[in-house]
Image: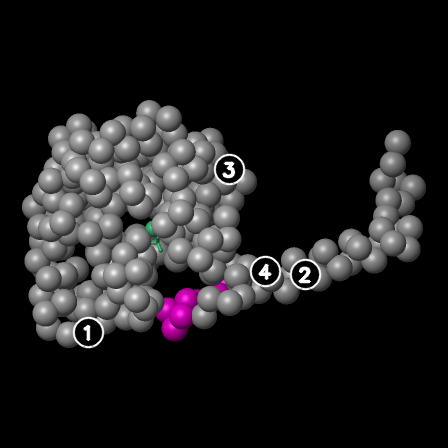
């Protein structure tokens, strides 16, 4: 295998080769995702929802993100590992942003960080990049701003917000970001952004005209039930599979069928 780097991703875009990206928050899952040949593993702050059961991504802390990222890194040989900087750990000022990014790199061994927003966080992005830490942007539906949006519906449907998104994407490319996630925006807008930039655009609910796709692993495996956006394709019904396995185990235990003669010492 050859390790994926931020440069690999930019080269892939040049060649027209699509980029695959999935989330992981722990060693065992990361090992499977990496082994399957997924290009980028995101240690997303969606861990706040998926791992901890919070309603939003806001409560997860920098220490918790570092714990998840360090676990993921131990399972990865090939994928590029990108770590979300959580809400409240970069918005105050560029120094705080750099301190948080440095902690993630030193304490988890992650390969890059991701931050949400454009113009508002420009100085922070530059500061992190100046320290030699690769930055992935994230525009469109940025879940750390959910209380500002008030809804999880599609973003940038209208001209004003679409124009700001295009400006922000260009600004992030100029600042030196190696890629940008575009979440839940019209496919036509996402394609336009992807075509106008040289860095890869990774979409989630942003259509097929972008340079790669990302999904939350637990969602695409069908482990989560309640979350049903149009963009989600489920590759397994793990919820049903796991429920069946747990029920079968319980029945076996209760009727004394497990363990059998071969399953003991
Ligand atoms: O935290 C996350 O999982 C993300 C992806 C949905 C892009 O930011
Ligand atoms: Na995130």
User: Is residue 233 covered in magenta?
Assistant: yes
Q: Which comes before the other along the chain, label 2 or label 4? A: 4
Q: Which residue is mark 2?
A: 243
Distance Cα–Cα, label 2 vs label 4? 8 Å
Q: Quadrant of the N terminus?
A: top left
Q: Which residues are magenta?
A: 229-235
Tell me which label, 4 or 1, sits earlier in the chain.
1
- Compute the Cα span from label 3 to label 2: 23 Å
**Apparent side of residue 140 relative to residue 198 in the rendered image (left or right):** right
Q: CA distance from mark 4 to mark 1?
A: 34 Å
The residue that disc 3 covers is 27
Report, in whole angstroms, how far the alpha carbon at label 4 lies from the one at label 3: 19 Å
Give how far across and how far down residue 163 sits, in percent. 9, 66
For this rendering, which residue is in front, 128 or 22? 128
Q: Is residue 31 left or right of residue 88?
A: right
Give the secondary structure at mark 2: helix
């Amino acid at each position: 295998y050859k390790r994926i780097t931020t440069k690999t991703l930019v080269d892939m875009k040049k060649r027209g080769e699509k980029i695959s990206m999935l989330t992981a928050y722990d060693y065992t899952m990361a090992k499977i995702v990496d082994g399957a040949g997924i290009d980028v593993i995101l240690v997303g702050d969606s861990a706040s929802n998926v791992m901890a059961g919070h309603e939003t991504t806001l409560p997860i802390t920098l220490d918790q993100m570092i714990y998840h990222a360090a676990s993921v890194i131990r399972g990865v040989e090939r994928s590029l590992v990108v770590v979300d900087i959580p809400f409240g750990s970069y918005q105050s000022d560029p120094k705080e942003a750099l301190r948080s990014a440095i902690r993630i790199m030193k304490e988890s061994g992650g390969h890059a960080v991701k931050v949400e927003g454009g113009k508002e966080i420009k100085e922070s992005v530059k500061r992190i990049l100046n320290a030699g830490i690769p930055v992935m942007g994230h525009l469109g539906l940025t879940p750390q701003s959910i209380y500002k949006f008030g809804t999880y519906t599609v973003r940038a449907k209208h001209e004003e917000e679409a124009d700001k998104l295009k400006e922000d994407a260009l600004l992030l490319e100029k600042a030196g970001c190696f890629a940008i996630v575009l979440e839940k925006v019209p496919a036509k807008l996402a394609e336009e952004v992807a075509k106008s930039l040289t860095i890869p655009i990774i979409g989630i609910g942003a259509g097929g005209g972008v340079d790669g796709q990302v999904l939350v692993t637990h969602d695409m495996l069908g482990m989560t039930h309640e979350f049903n956006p149009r963009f989600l394709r489920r590759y397994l019904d793990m919820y049903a599979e796991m429920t069946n396995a747990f029920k079968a185990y319980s029945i076996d235990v209760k009727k004394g069928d497990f363990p059998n003669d071969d399953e003991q010492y």
